[in-house]
Image (tube, rainbow, N blue to C red):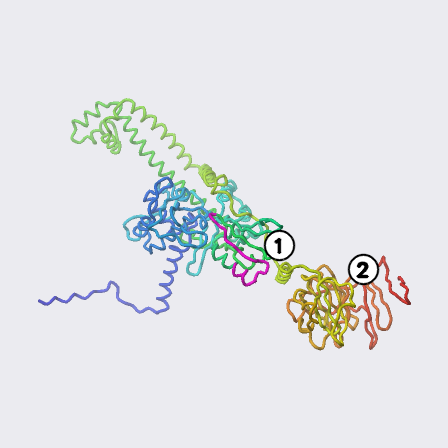
Amino acid sequence: MARAPAPPVTPAEPPRDTPLADALSARYLAYALSTITARSLPDARDGLKPAHRRLLFAMRELKLGPETAFKKCARIVGDVMGKYHPHGDQAIYDTLVRQAQDFAARWPLVDGQGNFGNLDGDNAAAMRYTEARMTPVAEALLRGIDEDAVDFRPTYDGSGEEPVVLPAAFPNLLANGAAGIAVGMATSIPPHNVQELCDVLRYMISHPDAGEADIAAMLPGPDFPTGGLLCESPADIAEAYLTGRGGFRVRARWHVEKLSGGAWRIVVTEIPWQVQKARLIERIAALAADRDVPLLADVADESAEDVRIVLEPRSRGVDPALLMESLFRRTELESRIPLNMNLLTEEGRVPRVVGLREALRIFLDHRHQVLQRRSRYREEKIRRRLEILDGYLACYLDIDGVIRIIRTEDAPRPALCAAYGLTETQADAVLDMRLRALRRLEEVEIRAERDKLQQELDGISALLGDESKRWQAIAGEIAETARQFGAGTRLGKRRTEIGAPAAAVDDAAEAAAEAEAAILREPVTVVCSEKGWIRALKGHLTDPDAIRYKDGDGPGWTLHAHSTDRLLVFATNGRFYTLEVARLPGGRSQGEPLRLLTGLPNGDNPIALLAHDSARRLLLVASDGRGFVAEEKNLVAKTRNGRQTLNLGEGAQAMLCVPVTGDMVAILGRNRKLLVFPLADLPVLERGRGVILQSYKSGGGPADVITFMAEEGLSWISGGRRHVR
């Protein structure tokens, strides 16, 4: 027999035409809101995302308190996934693992047993091999959840309930921090020290009118689980807390370890937060192998349970601070931790960036609401218990009559209510009473319990009726949190040291210092011939006549320097060129042309060769009599094309470059006229034409210039004798 065709299915709502853009925008907006509120951003009240909140609630339902036995993580993950969090088991397990890692979470919420990963970035063991339970911090977050402290909502399948937010007797948002990326927004909150947070919270309770700037200035900075050195100015830290946006520069902690024979090495004992140690060491080793950090010879990992990274310098003459500065700039030994306090506010509904004061205010308001709800819950429980105790006491006045009614009446409850004026609740309690409770001693205990509960009820009523008492109670709870988790405990001691702001390092200065430190400092004599061939001879030679030149060439400049020095070459085009003495050809050769080493154009010639001295000043003069004073620290060229310093007029060229050694200037022209004037009349410039030192007629120009001290006078040799003016 053929099966009858199924009746057509009538849709609940007829299809309608919708523009694709409208349909996509509506669905994407729903997805974005779901991602923001249900996955990525923490609630400002308890500092938790739904995954973390569900994990802790499931562990509580499994009775995994700090004092209970451990349970397999697979069991925990299964309960979370089956009852509360319908996502992948690996994602849930990763959440559990991170909350158990003491190098990732400043205040771990999970006490793990087994392999939960390490600082090198190794993964945790599979969930079937590891076990876990809650820590006292997690227990504090859940405290009072059975006392109507927070609202509950149905789980995803409607078979149970889960908390919307935790009571949070622990300031978890700032203590543990948070990180997440949502659709179009993100959050990043570093961890902080609980003792410092509690101090700020108690100050806010005692000073309700405290300003945002005052609150922001009270918190010294984050406290990372891996320690390190916080290198930010107090003003920048306060500004970040004030606006809710900013960042914190964290450096590794290190010290110099002395070895025998004057040798030493650097030992790194703490690295910045969220930096994988193995990847960091690979990066440092690559820099050492490629000589990108010329001061570093080798790196070794001697870590056990603690961090111990050993850095070997290339020579004992290296400056340890300079070596570390080079590594800070090139590796994750220095990291910048961002601050973006983007939170779910207004009872977890509105994402918004808040400052420190508002974030703490939301936590305090939440604790105030939890205190009121728990107090009302306790008040109702006491009233119900007092009602029952009053019924007991009424019956104790005539126990024989109560027994008679129970034995003879078919409906004893209405009979008891009529005979003794009991409520139905009291009558039910009397009927459920055990026979052993009828002894005289029990009546005494009931009266004592009633008096105690009545006293507690009076205290709760006074608390609910006086807001100042409620804030005093909250301050007491915060003080208890500080006592349990504060600076007096092993976990509560500050790990990240507050250091001075890191000084900015000029790239050129650092490169020069690295080269100087990496090269053995030796005396040399720099020789530049008349035709511009330059070389470096070992030692400080005292007999210039012993220096040999090519045929047809002769002496030009000879000066004493060291292998770590830099040379300044001043040319007729007004440019300074910089040379490294260590890169000059040796004395066995005849040298190399200066033009090839510096990029000096063919039409220009060198007029001065000096060993660089950053504290010295130079007097520069052009052929048209214009000039100025320049500080030598500003004359170092970063490229081989040189640094333009003396701007030249039409037809003019640079002629003189002399060190400044006095407070007076004497300039002699080709017309044999001498002009003397104070050095203070000349400007100090980094670049320019300067001022006119001496005027000349057509064809004239400066012949020589010198500086001298006015009190010593000017001297020169004339006719074989020294004359002083």
In the picture, measured across the screen, residue 403 lies left or right of residue 650, that is left
In the picture, measured across the screen, residue 228 lies left or right of residue 447, that is right
Q: Which residues are magenta?
A: 285-305
Q: Secondary structure at mark 1?
A: loop
Q: Is residue 358 visible?
A: no
Tell me the residue that label 1 is attached to.
316
User: Does label 1 or label 2 sit earlier along the sequence?
Assistant: 1
Residue 557 circle label: none
Looking at the rendered image, the quarter that the N terminus falls into is bottom left
Tell me what residue is drawn at x 33 percent, y 34 percent.
383
Q: Position of residue 671 (x, y in %)?
A: 86, 73
Tell me what residue is drawn at x 35 percent, y 55 percent.
90
Q: What's the amino acid at mark 2? A: Asp
Name the image quarter holding residue 596.
bottom right
Disc 1: CA contacts within 10 A as few (<14), some (14-19) or many (>=20): some
Q: Are marks 1 and 2 in contact (CB under 8 Å)?
A: no
Looking at the rendered image, the disc whose residue lies closer to the viewer, 1 or 2, is 1
Tell me the residue that label 2 is attached to.
663
Looking at the rendered image, the quarter that the C terminus falls into is bottom right
> Where 108 falls versus 558 (above or below)?
above
Closer to us: 299 or 627:
299
Closer to us: 168 or 337:
337
Q: Position of residue 42 (x, y in %)?
A: 42, 52
